[in-house]
Each structure stands twice: as C-alpha cells, then as structure tokens.
C-alpha cells in the first residue's frame, strides 16, 4: 500500500503516519482492518503486531499480511515486555475502553512513543447537537446513542490531564477536521479528531 492509497482510505491515518520513523517496531491497538500496519510495513519497512477483538476484522488483517493478535485490550498487554515497541498506536479506540487509565498505563509500559487519537467531544457540531437536546452524530462519532461502542466522551483538555497522570508527556498535538486536515485556530472547538504524540516521561 502506498501513501496515496492510504490517504484515499483514511486521511487521518495518512497524517499520523508521518510521525512514525522508518524501520520502527509498532504495536497497533484496535488495529481494525489492518490498513495502517499494511502501509507501515510496505512503505516504511516497519514491523510489529496489531491487536483486534472483532472477529470479522481478523481475516481482513491476515489477507493484508498484517500479523494480528485477537485479544480484548481490557485484558491488558501482559503478553508484551516492557519497552518492546518503538511506537504504540491507539487510534480511535481508546474511547471504547472501560478502563482507559489502565490501557494508557500499559501503552506507557510497552512502548517508547505513543500516538493516540479519539473523537473530540468538544467539537462544535457535537456541542450544537447537545444544545438541541440530541446526542452528537458525526464522521468521528458515527453511531446513534443506542448502538455506539463508544463508552467515554473526552475533550482535548481532559486527555492531556490524564496522560500526565499516567506518566506520559505530550510531544505534539494536532486536531484534525473531518477531511483529515490539521486545525490550528481554536482546535478544541473546530477539531473533530484529537491526535496526540506522547512519550514516557523520564524518571526524576
């Protein structure tokens, strides 16, 4: 898979991919259909694993030649050693976790850097929907209230506080609009997807 193909499938992943160094060992948590690891393996010579729970997505990953482990992230990452990966990805999956703090602590343990993305609940159409008495539905939150897999609703500021609490420092932050383009002006208001590049905080 090349960059143009990735961009056509997922513009947000294409933006995030530039943060990952060639030849990195990568763990992709909630890897879905494996499109990100497919690109990283073929275009950036990366290696690693995807972790996915959905039965329907495992064969798709295998068809892409993406090494995938079927496991619930809530069970933890005990199968991986400390600092086993250069980069851990958790892209649009963290909001589906019951134990968000525990998953983040595991990410900090097994990886050097981490890239985390999630729908920004403070995005202005989401706020407007709430003012109208409705739960938000958008490209980044594409479910009705009764069938959504999303258990947590977070804003950019909320996540920054939690990341600090679990020992992660923010290296870069970008808010992306629904076309996968960076938003620089009023990102907490105008960004539909929050993307953080993080690193384990050095011991004092």
Image: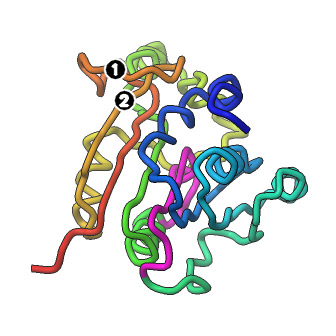
| Residue nearest the viewer, comparing 101 with 16 | 16
Vertical side of 24 occupied by 202: above or below:
below
Give the quadrant of residue 201.
bottom left
Instruction: Answer with mark 1 or mark 2, whichever residue precedes in sequence.
Output: 2
25 sits to left or right of 72? left
* Residues marked 1 and 2 touching at CB (< 8 Å): yes
- What span is in magenta? 83-99
Residue at 48% in and 32% down: 15
For mark 2, does the 10 Å Cα neighbourhood hold few (<14), some (14 to 19), or many (20 or more) residues? many
Residue at the (45%, 22%) spot, across then down: 126
Q: Position of residue 65 (x, y in %)?
A: 82, 57
Q: Where 96 falls versus 190 (above or below)?
A: below
For mark 2, what is the residue? Answer: 175
Per the image, is 98 magenta? yes
Where does residue 102 sit, x and y in percent of width and height? 44, 72
Separation of disc 1 and disc 2 at Cα?
A: 5 Å
Report x, y in % for residue 144. 67, 30
Magenta-colored stretch includes residue 191: no
Position of 76 with respect to 167 (left or right) is right
Q: Is residue 144 visible?
A: no
Does residue 6 appear to the left or right of 115 in the view shown?
right
| Badge 1 element | strand
Q: Residue furthest left?
A: 204
User: Can residue 96 be spotted in the picture?
Assistant: yes
In the foreground, 183 or 16:
16
Pick the quarter of the image with the N terminus: top right
Vertical relation: 108 (above or below) 57: below
x, y percent for residue 12: 54, 31
- Quadrant housing the C terminus: bottom left
Residue 183 badge: 1
Numbered disc 2: secondary structure: strand
Above or below, 2 relative to 64: above
């Amino acid at each position: 898979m090349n960059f143009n193909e990735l961009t056509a499938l997922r513009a947000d992943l294409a933006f995030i991919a530039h943060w990952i160094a060639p030849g990195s060992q990568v763990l992709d948590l909630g890897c879905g259909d494996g499109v990100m690891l497919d690109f990283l393996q073929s275009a950036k010579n990366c290696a690693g694993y995807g972790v996915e729970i959905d039965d329907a997505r495992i064969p798709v990953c295998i068809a892409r030649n993406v090494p995938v482990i079927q496991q619930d992230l809530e069970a933890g990452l005990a199968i991986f050693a400390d600092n086993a990966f250069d980069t851990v990805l958790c892209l649009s999956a963290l909001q589906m976790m019951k134990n968000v703090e525990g998953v983040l602590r595991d990410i900090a343990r097994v990886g050097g850097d981490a890239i985390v993305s999630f729908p920004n609940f403070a995005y202005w159409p989401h706020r407007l929907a709430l003012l109208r008495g409705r739960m938000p539905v958008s490209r980044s939150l594409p479910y009705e209230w009764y069938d959504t897999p999303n258990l947590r609703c977070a804003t950019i500021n909320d996540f920054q506080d939690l990341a600090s609490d679990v020992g992660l420092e923010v290296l870069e932050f970008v808010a992306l609009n629904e076309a996968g383009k960076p938003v620089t002006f009023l990102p907490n208001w105008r960004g539909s997807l929050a993307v953080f590049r993080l690193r384990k905080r050095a011991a004092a």
